[in-house]
Image: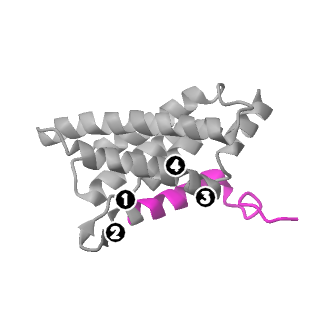
Amino acid sequence: MRPTVKAAGVGVFGFGLVLAIIGILLFVAPSRIGGIDVAMPWLAAVTAYMWGALRPGIAQSIAAFALGLAQDYISGGPLGPFALGFVVIYGVAALQRDALAGQTAAAAWLGFALAVIAGAIAAWIVGWVGLGRPPGFMALASQAVLTIVVGALAARLLGGFGSVGVANAERA
């Protein structure tokens, strides 16, 4: 029998929370390639999306908000952009849940991309309010694109985007 996260007694919620915290720490780690600052993906956004798509609930939505606040605080920016961004990603995933039932991993990845774009727009608007001026759009856009690309790889750690359609089809 292949060991699973559930068999280890951690559960999907706890495992996702640990991965999200690691993702936040990687986000704030200095990253330079050849003397050029490199944008980091929002790895915690993958967890927020998977929680919304697989098992939405009040604990998961609060955790998505808390992860966003933690990322806001640790990154040194105003409080709120990532918090709202992660909650929007979670909410969009929860809204897509029925539509993704029985769909392929590619459809779930497209849903993830739409959720990240919505979260990035929300974060940009809140960042504008928090800073009193619009934040760098290209930096935010590059992080969103990188999140979408890396999200497919990170989602494999949480069971893959294919599990979104399968789990929701079994629920339906």
Select label 3 or label 2 by which is in front: 2
Which span is picked out in magenta?
1-25
Mark yes or no: residue 55 visible.
Answer: no
Residue 84 x, y percent position in the rendering:
35, 38
Secondary structure mostly seen in the magenta stretch: helix
Q: Check residue 15 in the rendering and tell me which mark sits there, or answer none.
A: 3
Q: Check residue 46 in the rendering and tell me which mark sits there, or answer none.
A: 4
Seen in the image, is 95 located left or right of residue 103? left
Task: Say whether disc 3 or disc 1 marks the residue closer to the N-terminus.
Answer: 3
Q: Amino acid at mark 4?
A: Val
Q: Pick out the residue farthest to the right.
A: 1
Task: Say whether disc 1 or disc 4 marks the residue closer to the N-terminus.
Answer: 1
Q: Amino acid at mark 3?
A: Phe
Return the residue at label 1.
40
Which quadrant would the N terminus be assigned to in this image?
bottom right
Task: Say whether disc 2 or disc 4 marks the residue closer to the N-terminus.
Answer: 2
Q: Are marks 3 and 1 in contact (CB under 8 Å)?
A: no
